[in-house]
Image: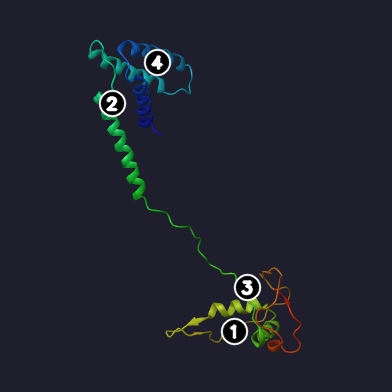
Amino acid sequence: MGEVEQRAAARRRVQRQARGLAAEQIGAHLVAARDWERHSGRDEYAGPGPAWEVQEWERISALVAEGGAGAVYDVAADEQAQEWLAEAEQRVQAGRRARQQRPVPGPLRPPVDRVEVRVVVPGEAGRRLEALAAGLGWSAERVLAVLAEHVQVDNEGLVHVPAVTVTAAPPGPEPHRERLPVLYRERPRYGREDYGEGYDGPALDW
């Protein structure tokens, strides 16, 4: 809450307390407010609130005194208070419009420069891939990554991979290989009819 809103709140507090009070009663409240202002002046955290309330009590006291004997404070008849109230409402409406016009930020998505996938290649295709990877000294994942880097889609939507050279791995451990966690599962919809009589059931996938 800014200073303008804080001062307006202090005025409204005084106006609520002064509603229906006569000059003598308002004078008593003014004395109490001044006493509070003096004591709060010793507190560095009190802020200007007490001084603002004293100013509003003084204004209301003068306004009721102008009304003559028997006059009481009526906030609805207080032109200055009504003007302040209208200004406060305008600030509220302006803030609401500003919030409505503010663009809603979309979800922040970091740029994707890699995709991690886990693939099960069954049957003859899997055996060819395994043999190719073993001959090159690479993992099957590495071979698939190289092929994916060169995949193309023509104008008719056909996907193909042109001839690409996959060099043999240097001696020693395969560099930069990310070992996937072991996953124990049954390959879906494949069995002896696909793998042959040598199929021994579920396997450990890397």
Which amino acid, mark 3?
Answer: Arg
Is mark 1 in CB contact (under 8 Å) with mark 3? no
Task: Tell me the element at label 4.
Answer: helix
Q: Quadrant of the N terminus?
A: top left
| Residue 19 higher or lower than 28, as above or below | below
Task: Tell me the element at label 2.
Answer: helix
What residue appears at the point 28 percent right and 26 percent down from the top-left corner? 81
Q: Nearer the viewer, mark 3 or mark 2?
A: 2
What residue appears at the point 23 percent right and 14 percent down from the top-left corner? 66
Q: Nearer the viewer, mark 1 or mark 3?
A: 3
Is mark 2 in CB contact (under 8 Å) with mark 1? no
> Alpha-carbon neighbours of circle 3 within 10 Å: few (<14), some, or many (≥20)?
few
Give the residue pinned by disc 4. Answer: 33
> Alpha-carbon neighbours of circle 2 within 10 Å: few (<14), some, or many (≥20)?
some
| Structural distance between the alpha carbons of marks 1 and 3 | 23 Å
Going from N to C along the chain, the mark reached first, 1 or 3, is: 3
Q: Quadrant of the C terminus?
A: bottom right
Is mark 4 in CB contact (under 8 Å) with mark 1? no
Going from N to C along the chain, the mark reached first, 3 or 2, is: 2
Give the residue pinned by disc 1. Answer: 165
| Structural distance between the alpha carbons of marks 4 and 1 | 90 Å
80 or 69, which lies in front?
69
Give the residue pinned by disc 2. Answer: 81
Residue 56: horizontal and vertical position, in percent?
33, 20
What residue appears at the point 39 percent right and 13 percent down from the top-left corner? 34
140 or 69, which lies in front?
69
Which disc, if any, is residue 118? Answer: 3
> Alpha-carbon neighbours of circle 4 within 10 Å: few (<14), some, or many (≥20)?
many
| Residue 151 higher or lower than 181, as above or below | below
Q: Nearer the viewer, mark 4 or mark 3?
A: 4
Residue 102: horizontal and vertical position, in percent?
36, 50
